[in-house]
Amino acid sequence: MAVYRLAALLLLICGCSPRGDAQAPPKQELPAVLARASEATPGPVEAEMRHVLYHVDDQVVLQIDYLRGALLPTTKAPPWFDDPTTFRIAIDTGEVEISPASLTALLNRYVFNYDGTPLKELTVSIEDGELKQHGTLHKGVDLPFTIRTTLAVTPDGRLRLHPTSVKVLGIGVKGLMKTFGIELENLVKVQRGRGVEIEDNDFILAPSGLLPPPRIAGRLTAVRLLPDAIAQTFGGSTREGHKEALHPSDPEARNYMFYRGRVLRFGKLTMEDADLQIVDADPDDPFDFSLAHLNQQLVAGSSRNQKDFGLVTTMPDYGDMLKKERERLALGKSAGAQGRSVREPSGRALMPGAVAAHQIHRVSHDRIKYGEPVFHSAGAAGQVDDQGAATHPRHAP
């Protein structure tokens, strides 16, 4: 009898049934937040942004003072930050500014960058409360032109540029065009799908078509010219769920982007029932963010998990990262010229003459900080362009 008792005790200690099968531990229920995450499906990821300099590329920057909207998938798959064609940015409400320099780059690099374009070499400036556009009109021969316009919002939420002055070869032709019944739409034929239409003499710009992916979707409700930027107000959204308040994990953060709900991908990671807040490491100026260089900013930053399984990531400004890289390269060049080696942050020595392989691809300056040169790279190898001081259009309050 003692032998049987000892065997039963051993079976109990080993967690085995009398048949020798392992006993499964009692099933534990998932916390409610994880149970909800396990049922998440692709769909609109709610978004909120405050005080963000959003790089469309290294020359086109949008200053987002505030944005409430969503990432809308363009396929059945969830939005993936590393592939901007997988989502659109819906702006339900927001205040977004663009500088003349950024608008100039946008028009030249995207809107009118195609074979047979009627307009090229465009520059945009703000003078005396009007938007001034100078460029070249191709009509058999290249003709320099200047157009001054006022700004207004169309009933369907687009931007209307109405000419007050038109000059070709430096000669005013607006009155002559009116006399002969000639309108701009007869002279300038714009390719469809570029976000620009010409109605009579007015340029009509649709925010949804001007930008490269990720494209934006939103309705303008107001526009005004500042001394150094075009300020656009978005509103009038009818999207379901756009009025729900979002609650970022770090409510004290001044400059941030917050994404909530559904499924979101970045790099090799997939976040179900997304709860991601990206916070500026330097709250004293707007958060300088580049989607194309997200991974570099992630590597240079830090992340911390929250008790509710959310994630808060703190990142340095994109321009500050590149400024440090430029300084490191300059140090490497100096050391190379003196026949000394210089060490990377990893500790690996760069031999004299080997720095060129680590140089930044084309660097350009943009208007980020008052009087301070800030440089933006477009790749990982190449040469450094000339440097210049830049002035940010306007710091967010």
Image: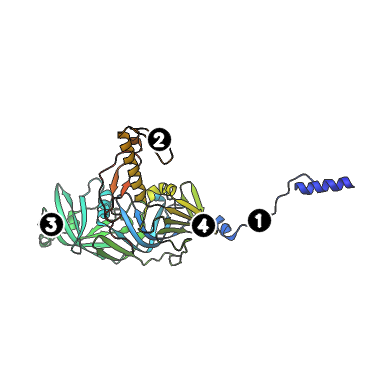
Q: Position of residue 14 (x, y in %)?
A: 76, 46
Q: Label 2 sits on what residue type?
A: Ala
Seen from the viewer's position, the closer of residues 265 and 200 is 265
Q: Are marks 3 and 2 in contact (CB under 8 Å)?
A: no
State the residue position of label 4: 310
**Residue in the image at 33% along x and 44% along y:** 327
Label 1's element? loop
Q: Label 3 sits on what residue type?
A: Lys
Is 149 left or right of 355, judged from the image as shown?
left
Of callouts 3 and 1, which one flags the residue occurring earlier in the amino acid sequence? Answer: 1
Could you tell me how far apart the alpha carbons at marks 3 and 2 are, in whole angstroms? Answer: 59 Å
Q: Which mark is residue 167?
A: 3
Judge depth for marks 2 and 4 and give the one in front: 2
Label 2's element? strand
State the residue position of label 1: 28
Q: Position of residue 266 (x, y in %)?
A: 45, 49
Could you tell me how far apart the alpha carbons at marks 3 and 4 are, in whole angstroms? Answer: 57 Å
Could you tell me how far apart the alpha carbons at marks 2 and 4 are, in whole angstroms? Answer: 39 Å
Could you tell me how far apart the alpha carbons at marks 4 and 1 are, in whole angstroms? Answer: 21 Å
Of callouts 3 and 2, which one flags the residue occurring earlier in the amino acid sequence? Answer: 3
